[in-house]
Amino acid sequence: MKSVLIAGLVHETHTFLADATDIERFREMVWRRGSEMLDYCRGDLSPMGGALEVADAAGWKIYPSRYGAAMPSGTVDDDVLEAWWSEVERDLDGALAAGLDGVLLVLHGAMVCTSFPDAEGELLRRVRGKIGLHIPIAADLDLHANFSPAMAQHATIFTGYRENPHTDARDAGVRAARLLDGVMQSGLRPRVVCVKPGALYAPVGTGTTNEPMRSFEATARALELAHPELLEVCVLPGFSYADIECAGFSLVATTAGELAHARKLLTPLAEAALERVAEGNPLDPSVDSALPEALKYTEGPIGLIEPSDNIGGGTPGDGTGILQALLRYEVDNAAVVINDPEAVRACHSVGFGDRLQLAIGGKVDRLHGPTLTLDVEVENLTDGKFDLENPNSHLASLVGRHVDMGPSAVVRHRGVRILLTTLKTPPMDLGQLRSQGIVPEELYMVGIKAAVSHKAAYDPILRASFYVDTPGLGSSDLRRFTYRHVSRPIAPLD
Ligand SMILES: [Zn+2]
């Protein structure tokens, strides 16, 4: 029987946001330890759920340690990494004394802490330092990981999501656990190689049903088939809103063969990622070019996609660009979601059917459109909890199956309904609207704060969708950002 310590720390960090991410943001989403972590994750479709399924089937003795995850947001306080590490270190001590064969970590790969720009590299370095060179470490990654040399140096196995929207998050956990089980049985010690082409892809350019990612993923699968020593090839377009040295596209292979040979096999893919960088950075049309086109449709639902306030990419979710556009064009039967705890409290202080003057959105910073003060009617007041309609939703990679938006309210101003939430919640599952009394299929227009992650939920019901360029730090135009730390030269900046 193999003994494995399992832990996880998941965050996608947007370093251009002014607000820091403290440990409370983890506690309000996922911050669980020991048997509580096992009970929470067993049977769900998160990477941790997938890893535990393999662990149970293989009969591992599990040392369950700390698992934390928070919504994408600004730079993470060092306290989070230190709190995580103090417990994991203690659990590793206990496991090493009793006998430890492997470590399995559920990671994202794009976490940035105040003192540790490469947070995953740092925590892998600490784990490796503790357990020595011979015990294998396996980790799974989001495809938006900003992979670093330290990550390659300290871990034994990496697997990554292959789909964006991330409907296959569980599978990455399954493969990490299976590969770890294999190397614990065989005694083989694979190594990890990374090639970085020097390219940033904006989130809108990283969808895997579109080019160029679709071709890159197909090439990666073909490489694995043709070269069985490549245990896993990860195509990681990275997370571009991180101004850190290791930001950007990475090709990563876990190989049982020669590192130099694996590097040679990855190089054509890296060259292609650089050549196709323009396709990875499509620009969004202005509201005034997109809306008239959208309004040519007499029937909905029509999606207005707003990458600039892409909640899954870390932005505040309180941008008012789409709401303004819907009001200016007098659109009827529309809905938007805006995260605004203050507005929710104001609604909960009155009752159903009451009217009030409500200041909505644009409060976290000055970059996501102005606060709009509207005369609204309160249509619904809820606790904001719902279960995923699609258990494979992109949200499952973050939260498993239960979603908590905090106290929420639905208000109406003219033809627009606004779902106000306390905890920002990306539009990755239709249960978000339906649970609050808004039937998404019956809407004419719906504002969607996302770049790609909404597609699995919304594309099947949308008659058409239009990307729009609104104000915000999720802009698809990376040249609007001032990068100081990313390794240069990098396309499309240089
Ligand atoms: Zn991602």
Image (cartoon, grey):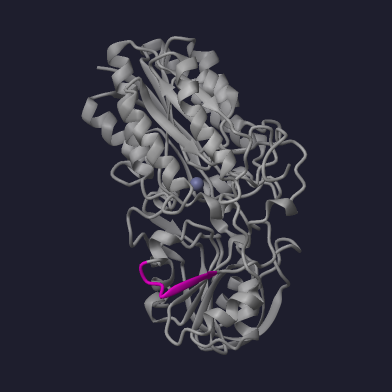
Magenta segment: does it hold 464? yes
On screen, residue 155 above or below 435: above
Left or right, 480 with respect to 309, comes to right
On screen, residue 356 above or below 283: below
Left or right, 408 with respect to 341, comes to left
Q: How many marks are shown on the rendered structure? A: 0
| Residue closer to the observer: 341 or 335 | 335
Residue 169, image quadrant: top left
Please state the horizontal and vertical placement of residue 160, each as a whole percent of the image.
43, 36
State which quarter of the image contains the N terminus: top left
Magenta segment: does it hold 144? no
Residue 161, can we see it? no
Q: Magenta stretch: give its range.
A: 460-466
State which quarter of the image contains the C terminus: top right
Residue 134, image quadrant: top left
x 39%, y 71%: residue: 435
x 69%, y 47%: residue: 20
Left or right, 440 with respect to 87, comes to left
Please state the horizontal and vertical placement of residue 417, each as a whole percent of the image.
52, 81
Please state the horizontal and vertical placement of residue 414, each as a whole percent of the image.
57, 90
| Residue closer to the observer: 236 or 219 | 219
On screen, residue 140 above or below 392: above
x 59%, y 33%: residue: 197
x 58%, y 59%: residue: 310
Left or right, 263 with respect to 477, comes to left
Please state the horizontal and vertical placement of residue 278, each as a whole percent of the image.
60, 50
Residue 141, can we see it? yes
